[in-house]
């Protein structure tokens, strides 16, 4: 949320959807972050797919308005116009995330949109689901070098322990159906300036992650307090050795220190030139 | 994509962003699914945060327009107006996902938005990142009943093997920072109509998943072909026993057969009344 100043008033915001509410929340959140100095209290109301549920939502929105003393903001991704009409009865500011784009798209494509509820939120097709789940199973089976057959991997993340490999692999699998494996660089690997032999056949799939040693120290400290593994000195020398090796081998490197998992994943796809639709 | 008819023309669509492109892709994808009978070829161009990169994007967009013989559609979540102005030079239909909502928000809040690039895309704060990663580590450590201390769990998913517990737990962790554990019902558990004793102290956190036996059979068959475990008969009796037990114990149940991971996760939060912002 934009600003955590305790003196600023609290504005109630609702993400209302006939589906999961992910579209409404994604755009609503991005929009709110562009307004600084406010505190927003947000609530997601998914599966509002009938007039009756819309009326319940109106009651909830109006209660929040009274409680906070401010007109609520409703970010709606409901496709059905009759549901949005009911939501408007709440007196809230309604931001309909699709409405502004429907007319230009209809003109461009020369057809009217079909506003069946559910359609906008991607009903599941089994193949897609399957690809995604298989990719996730792959990520878990190939986590931290457990399995070492990388023939089927789309990407292999290479980094020292706790630099962010696992969450990135899982994210790539869940969101893009990408089979991402990861290889943790061991102290033994780091004694050499060359790629570990097992990785050499897969050079074009390799992607290095690095991290600020201070941050790495913090993370490892939580996991194994006061161990050799967690020492700042250990973190410094491992990170330095890993970066040297990856640079010598011309493997792309990204620092995870100030990046979100989404950003890291997006950069990897961009750098390895993988074009994959999100789920 | 809406329609896979091979005869329909292919329309090029670009999701362009100064950040990851997730906002643009989320709304763009939902929008496209409302137009049936078209084939869209989509490409995400993230990190377009300078006029120079915008010009490269324009060139790419124009190439796609020539290649497909149709005016491209650009869904842009770039916050900086000067970048959107450059994108417009491509001649594409530009759908600026924030533009329509800025004016009403400015009126409502009585301030101008701040359009610094990067702001809209959630720069990382360490606590948030931490919560999310810890939740993911929790999900992996508590996957398939590996660890059985559920005191710290926010949610415990209960289901027979391969009904969708693991991907849902990981999704809940990555997107909502929720510590989701899961408990696989064994044949032994299913001989009784009562909750397994280890789950009883955590009744309020339990959530049951079920699945169509035919689908379960398909999934297990891929994993362990022609095993007792994968047999349709085994799947049928396990699912029936699990549903009976969960109903007797009044644990909420959701079928994963036709739901996406996003939908399952969203329903669980809704049913257990957990209000958590998405990451």
Image (tube, coloured by chain):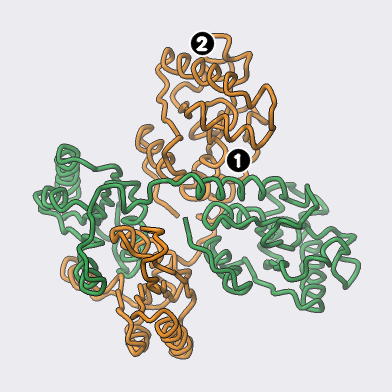
Chain colours: A green, B orange
Tell me, for residue B138, which label it has, or none. Answer: 1
Circle 1 marks a residue in which chain?
B
Q: Residue at x 88, y 73 (%)?
A: A193
Cα separation, mark 1 vs mark 2, equals 27 Å
Measured as percent of width and height from the top left, residue B162 is found at 58, 32
Is there one chain holding both mark 1 and mark 2?
yes
Q: Image quadrant for the N terminus of chain A?
A: bottom left
Between disc 1 and disc 2, whose residue precedes?
1
Q: Position of residue A76 (x, y in %)?
A: 24, 55
- The residue that mark 2 highlights is B194
Residue B90: quarter of image: bottom left
Instruction: Categorize mark 1 by other alpha carbons within 10 Å: few (<14), some (14-19), many (20+).
Output: many
Measuring from the top left, give residue B212's x and y in whole percent. 47, 28
Residue A53 in the figure: left or right of residue A170: left
Query: In the displayed structure, would residue B79 be above or below residue B215?
Result: below
State the residue lying farthest toward the front.
B7
Which disc, if any, is residue B200?
Answer: none
Q: Nearer the viewer, residue B219 or A232?
A: B219
Residue A5 visible to the viewer: no
Residue at the (21%, 60%) spot, across then down: A96
Letter of the chain that mark 2 sits on in the rendering:
B
Q: Residues within 10 Å of mark 2 (few under 14, many from 20)?
A: some
Total labels: the figure holds 2
Q: Residue at x 32, y 76 (%)?
A: B114
Judge by depth and name the residue closer to the eye, A61 or A169. Answer: A169
**B82 sits left or right of A220 in the view:** left
* In the depicted structure, whether residue A10 falls above or below residue A56: below
Q: Residue at x 70, y 74 (%)?
A: A252
Whether label 1 touches label 2, CB < 8 Å: no
- SS label for mark 1: helix
Q: Residue furthest top?
A: B192
Q: Residue A206: where, in percent of width, then height?
A: 73, 67
């Amino acid at each position: 949320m934009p600003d955590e100043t305790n003196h600023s008033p609290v504005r109630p915001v609702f993400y209302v959807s006939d589906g999961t509410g992910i579209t409404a929340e994604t755009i609503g959140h991005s929009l709110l972050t562009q307004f600084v100095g406010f505190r927003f209290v947000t609530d997601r109301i998914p599966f509002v797919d009938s007039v009756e549920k819309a009326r319940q939502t109106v009651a909830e929105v109006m209660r929040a308005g009274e409680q906070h003393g401010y007109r609520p903001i409703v970010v709606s991704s409901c496709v059905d116009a009759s549901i949005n009409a009911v939501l408007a009865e709440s007196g809230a500011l309604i931001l309909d995330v699709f409405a502004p784009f429907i007319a230009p798209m209809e003109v461009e494509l020369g057809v009217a949109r079909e506003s069946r509820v559910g359609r906008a939120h991607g009903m599941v097709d089994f193949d897609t689901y399957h690809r995604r789940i298989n990719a996730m199973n792959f990520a878990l089976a190939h986590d931290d070098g457990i399995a070492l057959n990388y023939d089927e991997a789309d990407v292999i993340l290479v980094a020292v322990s706790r630099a962010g490999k696992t969450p990135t692999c899982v994210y790539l699998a869940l969101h893009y159906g990408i089979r991402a494996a990861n290889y943790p660089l061991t102290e033994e690997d780091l004694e050499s300036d060359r790629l570990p032999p097992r990785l050499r056949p897969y050079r074009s799939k390799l992607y290095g992650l690095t991290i600020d040693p201070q941050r790495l120290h913090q993370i490892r400290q939580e996991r194994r307090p006061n161990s050799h593994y967690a020492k700042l000195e250990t973190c410094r020398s491992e990170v330095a050795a890993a970066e040297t090796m990856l640079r010598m081998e011309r493997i792309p490197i990204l620092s995870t220190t100030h990046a979100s998992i989404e950003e890291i994943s997006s950069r990897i796809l961009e750098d390895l030139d993988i074009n994959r639709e999100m789920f």
